[in-house]
Image: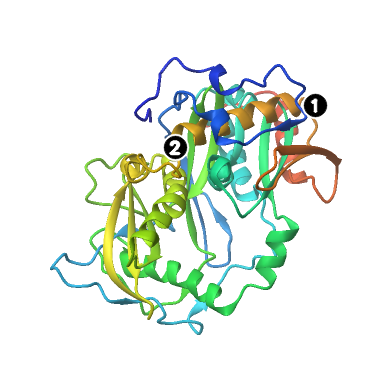
Amino acid sequence: MESRGTKRGAGKIEVAEPWNKLPASSLPTDPALYAGPFPFYRRPSELGCFSLDAQRQYHGDARALRYYCPPPTNGQSPNFDLRDGYPDRYRPRDEEVQERLDHLLCWVLEHRGRLEGGPGWLAGAIVTWRGHLTKLLTTPYERQEGWQLAASRFQGTLYLSEVETPAARAQRLTRPPLLQELMYMGYKFEQYMCADKPGGSTDPSGEVNTNVAFCSVLRSRLGNHPLLFSGEVDCIDPQAPTTQPPTCYVELKTSKEMRSPGQRKSFYRRKLLKWWAQSFLPGVPNVVAGFRNPEGFVCSLKTFRTMEMFEYVRNDRDGWNPSVCMNFCAAFLSFAQNTVVQDDPRLVYLFSWEPGSPVTVSEHRDAPHAFLPTWYVEAMTQDLLSPPKTPSPKD
């Protein structure tokens, strides 16, 4: 997905890495350092998918996929009550369970022999969640929340997994009721906008269970970094011009109604940046937003095209720039690749960042930071030691 300003041959993005001759002990995040041309980003292609059920169990199929079913456009307000069912028909995921990369690793294990480019392709790739890459993209403009990413190299592959920071954990454990309700509203909006089958109808009377998820697994490349990443998909549009994923997927969001120029400016500078990063990475073309009033009712819907989001801040001196986001992400991936050189799943490099500071790195071994599960390491190692399997007719 080459955005405007992308150069196909710009694989090395040397312009955006003026410090690559310095000792790699930290990485600056100042946006001005990353203002070069847009780096090469290969159009993401979907390799497969998986689902998580109501008990958060993994299934290597599309059973949790839902279908976009917007209300008729008759000029009337949708009037969706986003508070309906809270809290009695709400089953939130247990956030104390640290899932790390486990579900994605289940998929990799299932498909390691059939990866596009062969199993050897994985040895040079970076494997992570889309959400972790989204945080990297938005880092040069983030002013409030820091992050930590754990990295390990195993069989040549670099794995990146987020670690909850102490500040984020404290915030989660003291989350005020209003914020919990706002989180529910986002999921409730999906219930109003999605059906279980193409051409079906929505059913907002059911339980909102945030354990359930449909995830797309994608392959891409940023600069000279091959990527294999997965992200949750809200729904597929049966009416999309093409049924080829990921271009038929739709991202659903809610936001409070904007009633002043200041509110709009803040929305375009902050929220739209996150929406863009989250949707651009997997190649999702459209974000459909439901704008809610103070009473929690959706009063209007608006579709934002991912490739046009930057237009809202192009002339804003305090806005964001997609080139800066992608160049920083590429620079971080280079920093991580050059730092994590030892091939050892028990060795973890923890990359830490706080707003206003550079990214720093520390080295750790085993618990509590090691995140590649024993079952995965053993299965992949066994695979390496075993002679190639002769495919049976059912394979």
Closest to the observer, 102 or 110 = 102
**What amino acid does circle 2 point to?**
Asn
Q: In this image, 253 relative to 347: left or right?
A: left
Q: Which mark is residue 300?
A: none
Tally of numbered tags: 2
Residue 43, horizontal then vertical, whole percent: 40, 30
Residue 97, horizontal then vertical, whole percent: 69, 62
At numbered mark 2, what does the secondary structure look like: helix, strand or loop?
A: loop
Q: In this image, 330 relative to 62: left or right?
A: right
Q: Quadrant of residue 160?
A: top right
- Figure quadrant of the N terminus: top left
Provide the residue designation for mark 1.
342
Provide the residue designation for mark 2.
321
Residue at the limit of the structure toward the bottom, as seen here: 88
Give me the residue at 68% from left, 73% from top. 174
At numbered mark 1, what does the secondary structure look like: helix, strand or loop?
A: loop
Disc 2: CA contacts within 10 A as few (<14), some (14-19) or many (>=20): many
Q: Quadrant of residue 167?
A: bottom right
Residue 346, horizontal then vertical, whole percent: 82, 39
- Which mark sits nearer the N-terminus, 1 or 2? 2
Does the image show residue 285? no
Task: Quote the CA–CA distance across marks 1 and 2.
Answer: 35 Å
Residue at the limit of the structure toward the left, as seen here: 74
